[in-house]
Image (cartoon, coloured by chain):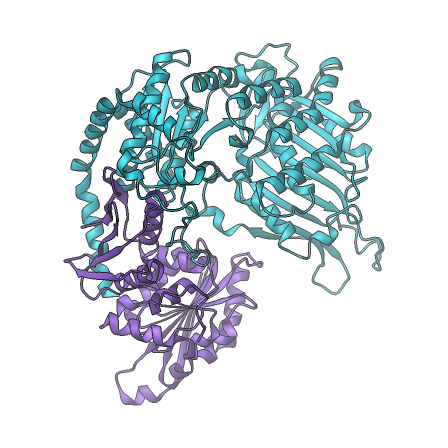
Chain colours: A cyan, B purple
Amino acid sequence: MSEELPEAAAGEAAVTDTPATGEAKPAKRARKTAGTSGPDAPDQGAREAQGATKGKKAAAGAAPAAKPQSAAPVPAADWANPLRDPRDRRLPRIAGPSGLVIFGVTGDLSRKKLMPAVYDLANRGLLPPGFSLVGFARRDWEDQDFAQVVHEAVKEHARTPFREEVWQQLSEGMRFIPGDFDDDTAFKQLKDAVDELDASRGTSGNYAFYLSVPPKFFPKVVQQLKKHGLADAPEGAWRRAVIEKPFGHDLASACDLNAIVHEVFEPDQVFRIDHYLGKETVQNILALRFANQMYEPIWNRSYVDHVQITMAEDIGIGGRAGYYDGIGAARDVIQNHLLQLLALTAMEEPASFDAESLLTEKLKVLRAVRLPEDLGRHTVRGQYAGGWQGGAQVRGYLEEDGIDPASTTDTYAAIKLEIDNRRWAGVPFYLRTGKRLGRRVTEIAVVFQRAPHSPFDSTATEELGENAIVVRVQPDEGMTVRFGSKVPGTSMEIRDVSMDFAYGESFTESSPEAYERLILDVLLGDANLFPRHQEVEESWRILDPVEEYWATHGRPAQYASGSWGPEEADEMLARDGRSWRRP
Amino acid sequence: MRIDLTDTTASKINKALVQGRRAIGTPAVGMVLTMVIVTDEENAYDSMKAAEEASHEHPSRTLVVVKRHARTSRDRTRSHLDAEVRVGSEAGTGETVVLRMYGEVSDHADSVVLPLLLPDAPVVVWWPVDAPENPAKDPLGALAQRRITDMYAVEHPLQALEDRARSYAPGDTDLAWTRLTPWRSMLAAALDQARLEITSAVVESEPENPSAELLARWLEARLHVPVERVDTAGPVVTGVRLGTASGEIVIDRPEGPLATLTLPDQPPRTLALKVRPTSELIAEELRRLDADEMYAIALRGEATEETPAHV
């Protein structure tokens, strides 16, 4: 034990004396290389074009950025890294040489989620040595200013402790491009920066473009990327686009958007972020269902009475009036998050755990989803009215800043869906979401039928409800099983108890945040956790008739802030002889 | 919550555990494994702390076996067992029982530990110091799926390494090997990038460093080239050089957590390679509880392509 001490001590000493010298130098060097390699860049592009005739795999070996002489000893196409072995499971999945370009890097999402996630990935040693981060925004910044902004964002929001040496590794690869999306010079600069990074950092031409900008800018940005040759991957390299919701506001607009993006990027190189799918518990749904024997036999219409999928928020719309009004809860949440959760809960077992098989199964179940015939009786929308929420008085939706007092935008939506297949026929799936509800919670509750016969007196089972398996997605990730149990005592009395499994990893720094997982998957090219455009379009097909019906029939019901939604929603379930769970 | 039991038995300890769990109001337990730490009083505190931190990632029941030696010969013959049961916030995310054994009972520690193991859950034994010569044959080691030793914490590390290689059984692992994971993953990533044939290799480290020796043997086994060992002033492993036809691939960490990676024809870049605290090493060990075949290959240093024969 005592032998171990010197190394730890040495490590600490070094941490304390590196910052002063370490931070200044790399920044300087970075600027210098940026300046000198700029003019060379066109040449380099030409060289890449010449090399394009080589075999695909061999070219991947000769990093396109590397100087010509290093291209000589390229091993055969079947080159395999001798240091990797499937038996060696300690070695983590490290992304290959690559860089990330973030558009709209000054936004909230970028500061609170993306930059900290990049740092956390680096801190866990999951990013390649030369990983580079390029910011693009309309700010008059130098690379150092950008590094400073990232530094602050990381210090404030990262989940892992701040370590100077990790920061140093990361900051050497940071670049900033100031400019508008219309600005051709800015994109030319971006192209130069990308080429320079290939040469100085060995990113090998692999870049992901993260569009953290409102969707109305998507066409502009992807067109600019195409125009300046940024979307075309050199042989053996990749270029990927990452986009965030909303993916359109109805089927037609979603198709348009997909067409725009796919015109520039191959469909399988477009990664749509649904951060729910990056959450550990959501991935655990698949483990729960398909790695166990005890759930699957009862996971069907013979045993399940109904399924409730809830995503409740306690906050209002805050400062998002401009985005939210006219969109509403159903488009904002049900179309993507809740239908994805439904697909994962209801789909059949995929042939294997790869993106293609998952897509097949998810699509199959989404295509089998059927809306109720009478939308008036089986869908409900609402708007929060003023009231008391969690001990604070809050305004109603129509009184929020920037909201038209006559707005019919829904802040609460509940719909009933059925799935027309052998497994689920006749089992309703109730989806609900809302703002300013009792508390923040997302859960999937699979509620089972009552026992067909009870040998006990009716007085003994008076308090007995239905069995349920509840997957809690957030905030306190885990799983609850509810079942009946005898109350200790001399009389026979049975009541419900809950058995709770808190997902062990969820409260430690070791569990990766959803964005970490998703960014790493983008860099690795692993599309398992990303909805494909077919799924997005299929989801709009489900939701569009509801929105059309709402647009022409009545107004949203009002519900008190801090409650669990409008009375109409309770009536909707009461009609079916059921009631909502209190999550 | 903390319950002290003097001159006790395993069944009384079990009762105390249930009582403690009731008292803090969490009758259901989500613990995934039992961790047995065999240590002396000197190292008990540090190892318990490391295990407690690791338990945040792997909720576990931790049994700390402390063998005590009485000063007087009269006390030495008297055999008795003291226990300290900790549940709730004092025990990370699981339960901790410190078992202090005096006299003859310390030779039969397995009889105390066996009834306290979580039903059906895997067992891990960790010897922070003084690991037995053959961990798998040790009475406590025989209860476990995973046996963690530390060649770093011995007088003659390289001698210990030979012992481990001789007595290896599936499920054995050593923290000297765990410490190498960041090095190994960076070397693999560097090679992913360079994609070159390796013709020679050098491992630089302080003298008698078991991790460096394991690293050298691993490289020998995987790359099929002789690996030169070079002594430096340390600390620990300071560098690895892989020779290729077009230049060297070098990871150099002269001191502290900051290393430099150099690939042929590319400018050098900085790399974070910190020395990890014991709790992180233990957490990594607990992530997988099946046999670590790559460790066996590195221990033996043979260029085996097939699954190694299990002892």
Q: Toward which corner of the image does residue A171 lie, by quadrant?
A: top left
Residue sitting at x 60%, y 52% = A500
Of the pair B263 and A9, the residue shown nearer to us = B263
Where does residue A26 sit, x and y in percent of width and height?
21, 33
Answer above or below: position of A256 versus A429.
above
Of the pair A212 and B16, the residue shown nearer to us = A212
Where does residue B189 sit, x and y in percent of width and height?
35, 46
Where does residue A512 sit, x and y in percent of width and height?
45, 43
- Tally the marks: 0
A114 relative to A561 in the view: left or right: left
Q: Toward which corner of the image does residue B309 lie, by quadrant?
A: bottom left
Which residue of the protein is positioned furthest toward the left in this rendering?
Answer: B233
Residue sitting at x 81%, y 37% = A577
| Quarter of the figure with the C terminus of chain B | bottom left
Asked whether the viewer can see residue A149, the reply is no
Answer above or below: position of A549 versus A72.
above
Where does residue B299 sit, x and y in percent of width and height?
34, 68
Of the pair A441 and B220, the residue shown nearer to us = B220
Of the pair B223 and A259, the residue shown nearer to us = B223
B93 relative to A434 in the view: left or right: left
Answer above or below: position of A138 versus A44.
above
Asked whether the viewer can see residue A139, the reply is yes
| Quarter of the figure with the N terminus of chain B | bottom left
